[in-house]
Structures are given as structure tokens and as C-alpha cells.
Amino acid sequence: MEGIPKSVDEISLTKLSLTKLSLTLQDLKSKVNTFIMNKWQESWDEQLNNKLYSIHPDLHVKWSKGMRKNRREEIVLARCRIGHTYLTHSYLLKSEPIPECIPCGEILSIKHVLIDCVDFAPSRARYYTADSLKELFDNVDPAKILGFIKDIGLFRRF
Ligand SMILES: [Zn+2]
């Protein structure tokens, strides 16, 4: 097999070169993890049309949890971030037409509900203002996002 030392001299030489580099297992793990993360980031940076890229472009930044004590609230926040909720995507399972926003008739999406819908604007303004999902998830207190969703009566449908 290639790459595996075959003789005592080769093993000694390998140990010697590792000693000379003074590379610990922890150092090696760290280097490998950094290499993998950078490769992943390079691949992610090519996904410009991916809706998740727009809210989380830098993989080195950890996605903060909502830190909710209520598990259901944590689930709703996670679903909002990935843009998939029962309300907006159950039509795929039911073979129904794509849902429309009842107040305004636009195609129902998380971005529409949380950012764009003019009919929800007065309710939304009582909790937060944001021009994009990235701005919303980066800057707005999760309690305010959840408050808005509860206020418009969609919390149980996310
Ligand atoms: Zn609407």
C-alpha cells in the first residue's frame, strides 16, 4: 500500500519528521477542520441563488439559537429561517395549488409574511422593521418575531 511506511527506517523517519514539525494531533485536527470549512465556504459562495445563502452567507459564523424556553417557539424560528413551514409548503404533500396570502393574494412565502406583505405591515410595525430576512434574523429579537407571528394568528400554522 502506498503511503504506509514499510520498514523500521521509514517508520523512524516518519516519527522524526512529525517531531521536527512539532505537529500535535490537536494541531492536525484544527488544520483539517479549517481546510474542510474553507472548502465548504467556497462551495457555499457559489450558491448565490440559494435562499438560505441570503440569510446565512458566512459559514464561519454560527447560527445563533433563538434561546427560547419553549420548544415550539424554537421550531417556529428555525422554520422561518429555512423558509419552510406547514403553512407555506404543505401544498406539496397535499398536491394542492401553491397557497396565496389571504389578505393580498400574493404567493404565500415566509419572506412575504415576515417582510413584504402590506396587509400585515401595521401589525408588523408594532414588533419590528426589517427590509430583508437577513436583516430580520441578524438584528431583531426573536421574541418580537414570534410576537408578530402570534399576533397575526399564524403561530400554530408554522
Ligand atoms: Zn400578503
Image: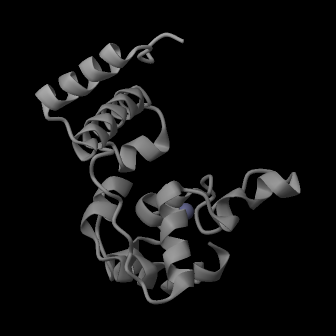
Residue found at the far top of this picture: 2
Q: Position of residue 97 (x, y in %)?
A: 80, 51
Q: Position of residue 44 (x, y in %)?
A: 40, 33
Q: Position of residue 25 (x, y in %)?
A: 28, 43
In this rendered view, identify the residue nearer to me: 134 or 33: 33
In this rendered view, identify the residue nearer to me: 29 or 150: 29
Q: Answer yes or no: is residue 75 visible.
A: yes
In this rendered view, identify the residue nearer to me: 82 or 29: 29
Q: Residue at x 35, y 59 (%)?
A: 63
The N terminus appears in which quarter of the rendering? top right
Indicate the quadrant where residue 11 lies: top left
In this rendered view, identify the residue nearer to me: 36 or 96: 36
Colour scheme of this structure image?
one colour
| 93 to 86, vertically: above or below | above
The C terminus appears in which quarter of the rendering? bottom right
Q: Position of residue 131 (x, y in %)?
A: 31, 56
Q: Exactly how many numbered labels are in the figure?
A: 0
Q: Is residue 22 left or right of residue 41?
A: left
| 56 to 10, vertically: above or below | below
- Quarter of the rendered structure image containing ligand 1: bottom right
Q: Residue at x 37, y 50 (%)?
A: 55
Residue found at the far bottom of this picture: 69
Q: Residue at x 49, y 77 (%)?
A: 74
